Image: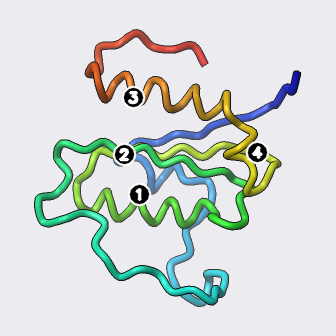
Amino acid sequence: MRTSKWKATCATAATISSSASTPIPTSTSQRPSTTSTYPTGRLIGANGCERIRFLVISFKSDWLYPPYQSQEIVKELKRKACDVTYCEIASTYGHDAFLLEVKEQTNLIRPFLDKTFHGYEVAEYAI
């Protein structure tokens, strides 16, 4: 049985700027160079996102999709006044963490889905 020491840092849209442990690069010169280009489509349509909740999970050691990219998505959602929660899981498994840190992700996703489908008056899970 695999045991893992992990720590998830979560923030709601109101606190994402102050709680992000990894600073988000603000200029393109600070970002790693890539051969692909970012898509130019819209993240949120003209109708907004008043009935949509978002949970964005990233892994501190993910080199393929580093946390700053997830934080950029969260900031864009915040600008659109979306209900967004950001969680960053400290893991040493790199990009494969999403395959291996299943229990940790479940402990974040289950309460999020319960609150999404049943409202905010659900029993809290012990993590």
Name the element at disc 3. Answer: helix
Nearer the N terminus, badge 1 or badge 4?
Answer: 1
Q: Which quadrant of the view contains residue 112?
A: top left
**Three-letter code for the amino acid on which mark 3 is drawn:** Leu
Nearer the N terminus, badge 4 or badge 2?
Answer: 2
Q: How far apart, in angstroms, are the residues tagged by discs 2 and 3?
A: 10 Å
Residue furthest front in the image: 99
Q: How far apart, in angstroms, are the residues tagged by discs 3 and 4?
A: 23 Å
What number is the disc on residue 74?
A: 1
Q: Which residue is mark 2?
A: 54
In depth, the one of 14 and 104 nearer the eye is 104
What number is the disc on residue 91?
A: 4
In depth, the one of 31 and 94 nearer the eye is 94
The quadrant in which the C terminus is found is top right
**Three-letter code for the amino acid on which mark 1 is drawn:** Val
What number is the disc on residue 113?
A: 3
The quadrant in which the N terminus is found is top right
Nearer the N terminus, badge 1 or badge 3?
Answer: 1
